[in-house]
Image (tube, helix red, strand yellow):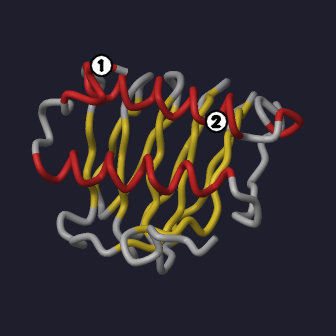
Amino acid sequence: MPNRTASILQLKFWGFSENRSTAKIRLHEHSYFQMQFCLSDGCRLEADGKFYELKKNDIFLLAPQTEHGLSYRGRFKTLTFKFEAALPVHPSVLYLPDCRRNRAAISLALSIVRKTFPRKYFEVEEGVIIMPTDRYALWMEYFLSGLLADFFHQPDRPNRLVRKI
């Protein structure tokens, strides 16, 4: 079955990770979008010369070629998605602090992961990145495509489908 979302969004890789100690990912950039769902407090994002203290239920989206780095203080859990997409590249950083929409999106993403992701990879404490070679990635592509369309359409309110879920 061909990937029907390829013209909108195509996952490069994604995964769940948990850092247990202080760590720093130095400034870098890449040629694709990065979206991160924060599942706990304890991370500082530096992007385009600005700093963001990330907390549970925050979401951020980085455009391609956006210089960024992350500093973790103690235990931090996240879902990270890296993908190519037909999206605007400005703003280069879209930071969405905790709100009802984020909580609904994160809950739905975790539900998709728990129901479709190979169990042996979920909540692997050392963190894992999965290459999109299996069909479960297609579920996430459809979800992220809809979520991003909704964010860019009405960034302050979830749509009716997300509210129902």
Residue at (26% x, 66% y) in the render: 92
SS at circle 2: helix
SS at circle 1: helix
Instruction: Indicate the position of residue 53 as horizontal and vertical percent values.
Output: 37, 33
Q: In this view, does 65 lie to the left or right of 141?
A: left
Instruction: Indicate the position of residue 151 as horizontal and vertical percent values.
Output: 21, 46
Label at residue 164: 1
Question: Going by the picture, which residue comes out furthest to the right?
Answer: 120
Residue at (74% x, 63% y) in the render: 131
Quarter that holds the C terminus:
top left
Of residues 9 and 77, the one drawn nearer to the viewer in this rendering? 9
Of residues 81 and 76, the one drawn nearer to the viewer in this rendering? 81
Residue 19, above or below 69: above
Tell me whether circle 2 and circle 1 mark residues in contact (CB < 8 Å): no
Q: In which quarter of the image is residue 138?
A: bottom right
Quarter that holds the N terminus:
bottom right
Amino acid type assigned to the residue bearing label 1 in the image = Lys
Badge 2: few (under 14), some or many (20 or more) residues near its Cα, within 10 Å?
Answer: many
Disc 2: which residue: 113
Badge 1: few (under 14), some or many (20 or more) residues near its Cα, within 10 Å?
Answer: few
